[in-house]
Amino acid sequence: MSHLSTSLAEFVSYVQTHLTGDEKGESADFLDHLFRAFSQAGREWRIGIWSMRRWPAIPAVVVEEVLATNDANLCANETLQNLKSFNGVAGSMFFRCKNWVFENCEWGFIDIGQGSGDGEAFDFEGNCDNMTMKNCSFHDTDGPGFLLCCYASDGNPNKGIVMENCLINAKSKRPLQPRVKASIFTKCYLKDLKDACRLPKHSARMISSTEGEKQIFQLAFAGPVTINEFKIKEDAASSVARYAIECWDHKQARWINCFNGMGIGAEFVCPIISRSTTKARLVVVRTNKDKAVITSFDAFNEPPGDGFDVSKGGVTPNRVGK
């Protein structure tokens, strides 16, 4: 049995044994165990839309290390592939929710389709209260990197939205418009990739290896370095379809996921939440044909981008992703 199957079986067993179906009293417990089941499987599933019909007085729900996408091939659980956001295609859409914390999460590769004009990575649709995002990344979307909607689906605004150390690279001509005056942005950045990877790269030795069917390309640095961007190139005959970039965390003594990607092509730039590490690796999960041929994998510490700090009640100008 796969790790995901085991985690889901344990989740089902917990629900059947400990929960009675009381939405008001058990929603936080249910969601906490659901997220834990999927986080053990590599953070690869689409959140879709979450909505609390009532606002129960419950402890905060904490979501850690989640990758959300609307690409069916990246979803780890088949039963979640058909979740759709009712106001358009989005990595995630939250409506009528309260007391959530998103930490070290990623939303990317969201397209505009199915009659939608949105295509955003994340959407607080409305009527959300005390929602916090820390160290989160939003990238590679056809639409906005992030939406904060007021009165979009009912007559109640979002309140108490806090974003800390988050990175947005929408690659979109539609602007970021964080104009909800009850929101706070602290040390957040919009990265324009035309300014990416311009400084000298970190000196490193690249080592190739395999783990099962996965190819590994690892960078070993002479000592701790700070990284906030990677640049990858593959040979014209190569066809990577799915990959992940991981950095080594010395304190936790384990690899930490920092970027999840699809195709690479001639060149692909991966902005990440800045971190210090002694080694990093590119894990090729799947190719369209044969083995991956990576011609370069480089790490950089670049200026973080267009920063914005918005206090409660403030506004920020429109920003267009590139």
Image (cartoon, grey):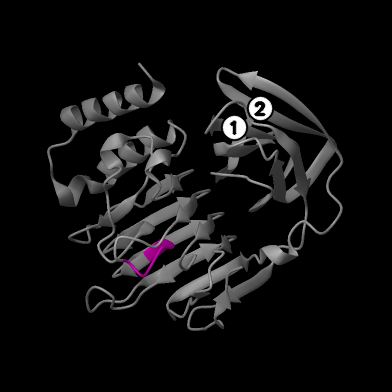
Whether 322 is drawn above or below 4: the answer is: below
Residue 288: x and y in percent read 52, 33
Could you say whether the residue bearing mark 2 is in a helix, strand or loop?
strand
Q: Is residue 290 above or below residue 297?
A: above
Asked if the residue at tag 2 contacts the one at tag 1, i.e. Cβ–Cβ closer than 8 Å, the answer is yes
* Image position, residue 86 (x, y; %): 25, 62
Q: Position of residue 72 (x, y in %)?
A: 37, 43
Q: Quadrant of the N terminus?
A: top left
Residue indicated by mark 1: 284
The answer to which of marks 1 and 2 sits earlier in the sequence is 2
Asked if residue 121 lies in the magenta stretch, the reply is yes
Comparing 181 with 87, the one in front is 87
The alpha-carbon separation of the residues under discs 1 and 2 comes to 6 Å
The secondary element bearing badge 1 is classed as strand
- The residue shown at (60%, 60%) is 165
Question: Which residue is labeled 2 in the image?
Answer: 216
Residue at 54 percent of width and 57 percent of height: 139
Where is residue 118 shown, x and y percent of the image? 38, 68
Which amino acid, mark 1?
A: Val
Q: Nearer the viewer, residue 117 or 259?
A: 117
Based on the displayed image, in which of its 4 quarters is residue 115 positioned?
A: bottom left
Looking at the rendering, the stretch of residues picked out in magenta corresponds to 116-123
